Structures are given as structure tokens and as C-alpha cells.
Amino acid sequence: MTAYIIDWLNLVLRWVHLITGIAWIGASFYFVWLDNSLEEPSDDNKQKGFGGQLSSIHAGGFYEVAKYKLAPPFMPAHLHWFKWEAYSTWISGFLLLSLMFYVGAESYLIDPTKLALSPWAAVAISLGTLGGGWIVYDLLCKSPLAKQPVALAVLLLIFVAAVAWGLNQIFSARAAYLHVGALIGTCMAANVFFVIMPGQRALVSAVEQGQAPDPKYAIASKIRSVHNNYLTLPVLFLMISNHYPMTYGHAQSWAVLMAILLIGAWTRHFFNLKHKGVIKPGILVSAALATIALAWTIAPPLATPAAGSAGGVNVTTEQAFAIVQQRCSTCHSATPSDDVFKVAPSGVVLDSVPQMEQWAPRILARSVTSHDMPFMNKTAMTDAERAQLGSWINQR
């Protein structure tokens, strides 16, 4: 019953995290588009202190939007703030991270083949990464480098790469990827909480007191907003990365991660320029070519000992089925005996030969090629057994 309750908690938290993430990123995309699409205001609007305006239509209604150069002469009665989308996404994400990797540290977080950690030590490293990572990022953004955006971006990329490499030496490959995503998400939410919202409150306070707003708050908020904008596509990939072992399961997974982050940010750059009326299709073309090049670079060899002929010895269906029963069916069964998985993951059931034949491509990809399964190699499948399974599949 405990495992059943945890599954429901996982479902609800993941669902909430997805919904709030859509709300946050959707709002971010909209306001970036809005800010980049503003037109020269009319003479009347210029006299009112507007710096830009925009007309649009949606769902059968016309909208007129105007943006002040800095602030209105007096505070409106109803001012809408956009903050809980970010906070709710982070809170639901942290709860999901805790449920998956803290409650299930032995199953999901700790990889004893890399570093034998106690659950408490692993959790402490995880929390230290999130908190310490934000401190480093925040200090860099407050340093003189803030006036040199390219140099700051390069240094931040090096920092993220170092974190990704370090985490991969400590945690399971899957956990390392998701923790990089959690760190980026933490920095994005903290940008809202510690920088953007205080800046907006200072702006509102100045208007209420009839004072000229200090531009330093707008400048600091703009830097963090730009960072959040370019990190949206990379963090979305990291949210779904646990489904794709060909990325996190690669020997140089940290480098694969950095390549994908750069491709995502570069793709986002195309849309940011497009909002301003600058269309550069070469950006999308180069991003697509880079993705293809990455996929080709990390592709498994067409013939390896693990996926080949197992030394030229034919493997019978009975031998292959025996391996699957011993190493896979503890989880992938109609009645799993595993202590964590009480329902066959992804609905893959391997209780019979026809079922094994049905899922042979999945077995080849996840167990033979990427070594992603058995999960954390809980059943200690050997390389020889992987080679036998690969040989049996290639003989079919």
C-alpha cells in the first residue's frame, strides 16, 4: 500500500509541476514577445508617458496594450503581479525531487558503483548543490561581469558544466541530469523571488511616494529575466531527460547535456530576435544540424560485443528468456516482486516469450546498448548476459 500511495503522490506532484511550469513559461514567453513586439506609441500615448504600445486580437476580442517608459504617474487600483507561477513550479518541483530522490535515495539517487553514500549524505549533497549553486550564480551576476554579458554567459556555462560533471561522478546518471535541471530551476525561481520581485516592489513604492524610481532595480531585473528566458528550453529538456537514456547514459553525459543546453538557448535566441522583426532562419537550421550531429556523435556502434554475436555463439530463445526472467521480470511482470516497483514500468511485461519478442527493440535499446536497464542494475545483469541478449535479438 505504501508504494501505491507514493505512486499517487508522484502522479499528483508531477501533474501539478507540469501545469504550473506551463503557466510560468507561458507567461514568460508572452511577456518577452510583448516587450519585443511593442511599437512606437501614438502622440497621445507619448504624452501619457508610454514608451510603446501594441494592438492584438485573440479569441474574438481586440486588445490594446501600452507600456510606460518607467512607471505610471500614480499606482492603479488593481495591479496584477506574476510570481506564483514561478513559486508554484519550484515548490512542486522540489517536492517531486524530494519524493523521488530523497525518499527513494537508495533506488534513484545513490549509485554505489560510483560512490557509496548513506541516504543522508546523498540528500545533503543534493541540497548543498541547489543552495550553493544559487549563491555562486547570484554572486557572479552581482559582480562586474554583469556589465559584460558574453563573458558572464561563458563563465556560467563553465560553472554548469562543472556541476554536471561533478554530479555525474557522485549520483546515478539519471539523478545527475535531473539535479542540473533542479539547480537551473532553482536559480530561475530565486531570480524571481530575490531580484525581480524586490525590484518591482521598489518600483511600486517609488511611484506611491511620488519619487523617481531607481533604475538599478530595472537593470538588475532585466539581466535576470533575460537569463530566465534563455534557460526555458534547456530546463524543459531536463524535465523530460529521464526518459532518454541515450543522453544521460552516455559515457560523457555532462558534455551531451551542455550541447543540448546550448542548442536550446540558441533556438530560443531565434524567437527572441523574431519578436523584434529580425528573422534569421540560419539559427534554426544550425540548431537542427547541431542536433543531428549530436545524435550521430553519441549513437552506439552498429556492432559491439554487447550487441553483437556473443563470440559467434548462437543464443537460443530459451537462454534469452531465462536471462530476462532472472534479471528483468522482478519489475517487468504482471506481478512484480521488486521492493519499489509494484507495477511494471511503462507497461512493459516480460512474463512470456511472445512478450519478450514484442519488446525486443526496447530490450536492445535499454539493456544491451545503453545499459540503462535493469534500473540501477539492481539485479546485477552482467556484460556477458547483455551480449547474449543482443546476440539473440540480432539473430531473429
Image (tube, rainbow, N blue to C red):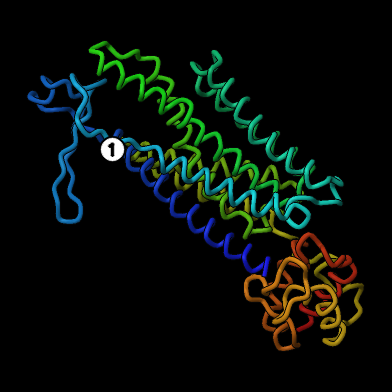
Q: Is residue 369 visible?
A: no
Residue at horizontal 68 percent and vertical 42 percent from the top? 255
Q: Residue 110 in the image: x percent, y percent?
A: 78, 50
Task: Identify the residue position indicated by label 1 in the image.
Answer: 34
Q: Residue furthest front?
A: 1
Residue at horizontal 64 percent and vertical 69 percent from the top? 4
Question: Which picture quadrant has residue 282?
Answer: top left
Residue at horizontal 59 percent and vertical 44 percent from the top? 181
From the viewer's side, name the closer residue of 32 and 266: 32
Q: Which quarter of the rendered picture does the N terminus lie within?
A: bottom right
Q: Residue furthest top?
A: 211
How many marks the image carries: the answer is 1
Question: SS class of the residue under badge 1?
Answer: helix
Residue at horizontal 72 percent and vertical 80 percent from the top? 335
Report the side of 39 relative to 158 (left or right): left
Residue 246 vs 147, above or below: the answer is below
Q: Is residue 48 visible?
A: yes
From the viewer's side, name the closer residue of 195 and 327: 195
From the viewer's side, name the closer residue of 316 and 69: 69
Report the side of 258 relative to 201 (left or right): right
**Which amino acid type is shown beneath numbered disc 1?**
Leu
Q: Residues within 10 Å of mark 1 (few under 14, many from 20)?
A: some
Report the side of 105 relative to 227 (left or right): right
Q: Which quarter of the rendered picture does the C terminus lie within?
A: bottom right
Q: Residue 269 in the image: x percent, y percent?
A: 43, 38
Q: Residue 64 in the image: x percent, y percent?
A: 15, 39
Question: Which picture quadrant has residue 374?
Answer: bottom right
